Amino acid sequence: MADRPGRIGVVGGGAWGTALATVAARAGAQVTLWAREPEVVDAVNRDHENAMFLPGIALDPAISATGDIAEAASCPAILLVSPAQALRTVAAGLSGALEPGTPVVICAKGIEQGTSMLMSEVLAEVLPEAEPMVLSGPSFADDVARGLPTAVTLAAGSVERARPVAEALAGQTFRPYLSDDLVGTQIGGAVKNVLAIACGIVDGRRLGTSARAALTTRAFAELSRFGRALGARTETLTGLAVLGDLILTCSSPQSRNMSLGMALGEGRTAEEVLAGRRSVSEGVYTAAVVVEMARERGIEMPIAEAVHQILSANRDIGEAIETLIQRPLRSEG
Ligand SMILES: NC(=O)C1=CN([C@@H]2O[C@H](COP(=O)(O)OP(=O)(O)OC[C@H]3O[C@@H](n4cnc5c(N)ncnc54)[C@H](O)[C@@H]3O)[C@@H](O)[C@H]2O)C=CC1
Ligand SMILES: O=C(CO)COP(=O)(O)O
């Protein structure tokens, strides 16, 4: 079995990359954090804080930031934490700089627009020399960085190959579970962002907690149909990376996707809300591609369809809700 890596490269200096850098440093690794913004590099090295994306968290001095992606690429394990739609470009920056077989852990949650590829498929195309892994599950960056207890799934082609990377991240408040279901582990994180926008709409319109529970449950039914069609295993669907992340993201305004939905439910437009945000709300970019993939495969996903139409065609929210409730009666499942 490979040794647990003592140095970790984190590629992406947003909230999640910074939080994961903290996790790795707490577990005893030396961390090289690559950030796109020179202000982030300076602030992490000088003030030990990423005031732009994760303000108010004191960073471990074992984390050093760089604007040179090759420095991060020289580490024996890499966490890839860009937004999903930028993953192809960011991963290409590592090309030629990795030792063959280096674990590259995808931490972004989304599906690529234009190609309908999962992030592991994008990685295989751009960085075939990497050993692809996926880290996903219910985990807000702020909670994780503050050291609040969190459990996630770490998936790889084999559980034994995932284990040393899990050991390099595990600590008193961060517990990775191992999986070899790379596909299933990615589906939850990508699709729950779309469904969380719908849950936010329910809250924004003050439709009540009964409505939110009903919507979350039916969202899980459609997420499970989508997952099964793409080959996700049942234990993954009911685990942290799918059900767990759906529950978290559909229940807290701390989620950027849910809070976007809340704003829509209160009558604001997506353009207005997104114009005031630096942080990424992945569901906006994944909605259309999920709906397209579902239509191609004949998978019924009425909630994702409604979110897509609200975002892309300004569909009236009241009418979308009425249509969802008045669909022909059917069995659950
Ligand atoms: N924040 C969180 O609690 C969690 C986030 N994630 C996922 O991690 C990924 C990154 O999200 P955050 O770190 O939260 O980002 P963020 O919202 O804090 O910041 C945006 C990040 O995107 C980068 N960025 C923006 N446009 C870019 C481009 N064109 N090319 C390269 N980089 C670009 C910025 O440099 C910055 O690092 C997303 O896929 C998100 O779903 C996963 C779990 C938790
Ligand atoms: O993925 C997340 C929690 O697991 C973060 O969710 P948001 O991107 O909606 O904030």
Image (spheres, rainbow, N blue to C red):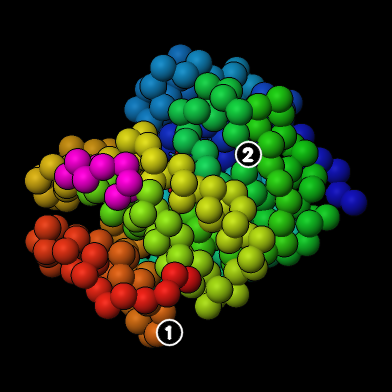
Q: Is residue 208 magenta?
A: yes
Q: Answer with the quarter of the image where residue 184 lies.
A: bottom right
| Left or right of residue 316, residue 199 in this image | right
Q: Is residue 56 above or below residue 278?
A: above
Q: Say which residue appears at 47% left-offset and 71% top-offset.
A: 333
**Residue bearing the label numbered 2:** 151
Left or right of 305? Residue 330 is right
Q: Residue 331 placed where, x, y %?
A: 42, 74
Q: Is residue 180 above or below residue 56?
A: below
The amino acid type of the residue labelled 2 equals: Ala
- Residue 65: x, y in percent? 52, 30
- Kindly identify which residue carries mark 1: 297
Q: Residue furthest right?
A: 1
Earlier in the chain: of badge 1 and badge 2, it is 2
Q: Which residues are magenta?
A: 203-212
> For this view, does 24 lie left or right of residue 224?
right
Q: Is 194 one of the magenta-colored residues?
A: no
Predominant SS of the magenta segment: helix
